[in-house]
Image (cartoon, rainbow, N blue to C red):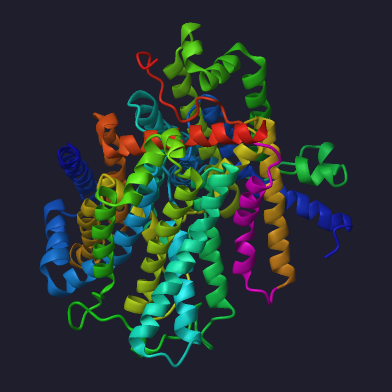
Amino acid sequence: MDLLNLQTLTDMLGTSLRLSVPLIFAALGGVLSERSGVFNIALEGKILAGAFGAALGAFLFNDPFGGLLVGILFGMLAGSILAVLGVSLGVNQIVTGIAINLFVLGITAFLSRIVFGAQANTLRLPGFKPIDLPGLSSIPVIGPVLFRQDLMVYLMIALAILVFLFLYRTPWGLAVRAVGDNPAAADTAGIPVHGVRYGCVIAAGGLAAMGGSYIVLSQVFLFSEHMSAGKGFIALAAVILGRWHPLGALAACLLFGMFDALQLRLQFNYQDVPHQFFQMLPYLISILALVGLVGKPRPPAAIGRDYRREAK
Amino acid sequence: MTRFLSLVFLLRGLLAVFAALLIGSVLILAAGADPLTAYGTLFQGAFLDYWGFATTLQIMSPLLLAGLAVVLPLRAGLFNIGAEGQIYIGALFATVIALYVPGLPGPLHILLCSFAGALGGALWALIPALLKAYRRINEIIVTLLLNFVALHFVSFMVGGPMMEPGAPYPYSPEIPESLFLPHLLPRTDAHAGVLVGVVIALVMFAVFHRGTFGFSLDTVARNPDAARYAGISVERHIIVAFLVAGAIAGLAGTFEVLGHRYRLFHAFSQGYGYDGIVVAFLAGLSPLLAIVSALFLAGLRAGASIMQRAVGIETTVIEAIQGLVILFVAVSLAFRYRATEVGRALRRRQEVERALDAESEERES
């Protein structure tokens, strides 16, 4: 394997970016909801809900935009469940998250059989096509990697920057961070704690669902049961690794995507080694990344804690 | 008082199940069948039919053991979402002993396999436990990620070094017949694994309510500072809770091989470890009620294929219903949540975290 070969390098980087896109969408959602103090183990279920919604929408409207829209809607629905149970009713957020993951897993498995029936595995849904940004796409290496992608990738880059600007450069972002670190103080300052958490958790559902939609609409063009395959959990690891910062999480996801791409290339180059051996690498690397963290991560202070006015 | 609360909790669980079945009947209607007939065939098949009940018992074995593997660490406020992975590694260890350690008398060999399976699960659970106790790394994420590692690792083993020569897809050679677990019902798949599960549930109940370990586990979780003052190590209890839980899940995997499949297949567990979470929460974290909830959920699964043959509803409807059950159990927690065992366990979790934080800060300064 020759990484110095320009073509190989370009391919590798392109694959890395594509593989990290679902993770980045989900991690952005994770950052948003966890900064507001809601632990989001349900990312996995939201990715899956988004993937199913995208397949359903694309199937019904025969159009990828319809798919994306329905996908985001389903993700926001899943997010709303977490908001109602975890924020309003004060059920433990971890339990709620696990419940949502299992619920989405079951319901999408059932509904996909009903909707797609026997053609589930042969169907090819309409998807997004790569768009060349004229001029930019002809820069060597960077051009094909960054500017010969489809709409979702550009959307992801824009959203990452937007989430960053929102959290750190706007009064609303300050409110979100305040709610996540000290809800009582935020409440005293007149910030609606539950309202902020609702907004963040539901938006996180939409974001994670875009990750699921990307898998369906840009990568595989069909829905299969449990296709999220732990991506939500890897994204959670990326949130921690990125220290709850949107750009940090983005960098962590890119790192994981790069290892995934490397893994695929190794699989291709060493075909006598069973492919399962390489398949466990992304998960192992996520764990190792958590273990290898230098220093102690400091999560938002109020994460996972229910906020009640009278409890203080 | 606890007994009264767990009774209330059981009723709450029943309500959750009822609500899930109600919505499930809408799903069945949507799929074009009559819900009453469908549920009728399902439950009749699962509990009143000889063969069907045998299948229920066979599925109950991994569900109950996985459920207990979730209940125990939660007692100390820790989430073990890794039963799935522990099942895989347990099954792998047991199969290795079964295939490559010849010449032992049957019963002794079965014991050795079970011990190896328990050891495998325990070692796999040791990873998140150590990371939690000494590095403060979230055990939920680690156990979840390790599940995928275990799944692919077992696939790798049975697709490579341990693959049956000439097999069409990855599985290991068959284990010797002397290792087959005894069957509870003649000519069926109902193996003795479920009895082991029931015994472990009873022991766990006794330990929680009578034993010193149960008491110190409780103390660690309820008031870590007091525990430390009394000389009880919080870290050690985290590790022991996870080791035992992993061993129990490892047994679930072992019995799948020795009692049901007689080979190690890739991806054989089909999410039993995750079902264990549903078992645990439906049972309100009581080891005794776990027996009931595992029986019920196993019945759902066993009856599903009978229902599919009879009225043509996809078995996946059961997965949807099971998802609804856990969702409604979560909803039911909202009502007088703080008074329940789950609520208490989760508050304990926060206590443990606070104590660990305090200690590591001490260490740093």
What residue is rendered at 77% in x and 54% in y? A12
Let me know if residue A157 appears in the view: no
- Which residue reaches farthest bottom? B103
What residue is rendered at 22% in x and 57% in y? B291
The image shows residue B262 at horizontal and vertical percentages of 38, 81
Pick the residue in front: B364 or B310. Answer: B364
The image shows residue B153 at horizontal and vertical percentages of 56, 67
Picture quarter containing residue A79?
top left
Pick the residue in front: A3 or B363. Answer: B363
Picture quarter containing residue B305?
bottom left
Pick the residue in front: A149 or B64. Answer: B64
A105 sits to left or right of A219: left
Let me know if residue A258 appears in the view: yes
Question: Which image quarter is the C terminus of chain B in?
Answer: top right
The image shows residue B293 at horizontal and vertical percentages of 23, 53
A275 in the magenta segment: yes
Task: Indicate whether A164 appears above or below B184.
Answer: above
SS majority, magenta = helix
- Which residue reaches farthest top? A189
Task: Indicate whether B49 appears above or below A85.
Answer: below
Q: Which residues are magenta?
A: A271-296
What residue is rendered at 67% in x and 21% in y? A165
What residue is rendered at 42% in x and 73% in y? B115
Question: Which image quarter is the N terminus of chain B in?
Answer: top left
The image shows residue B25 at horizontal and vertical percentages of 19, 48
A23 in the magenta segment: no
Task: Indicate whether A263 appears above or below B164.
Answer: above
Pick the residue in front: B87 or A211. Answer: B87
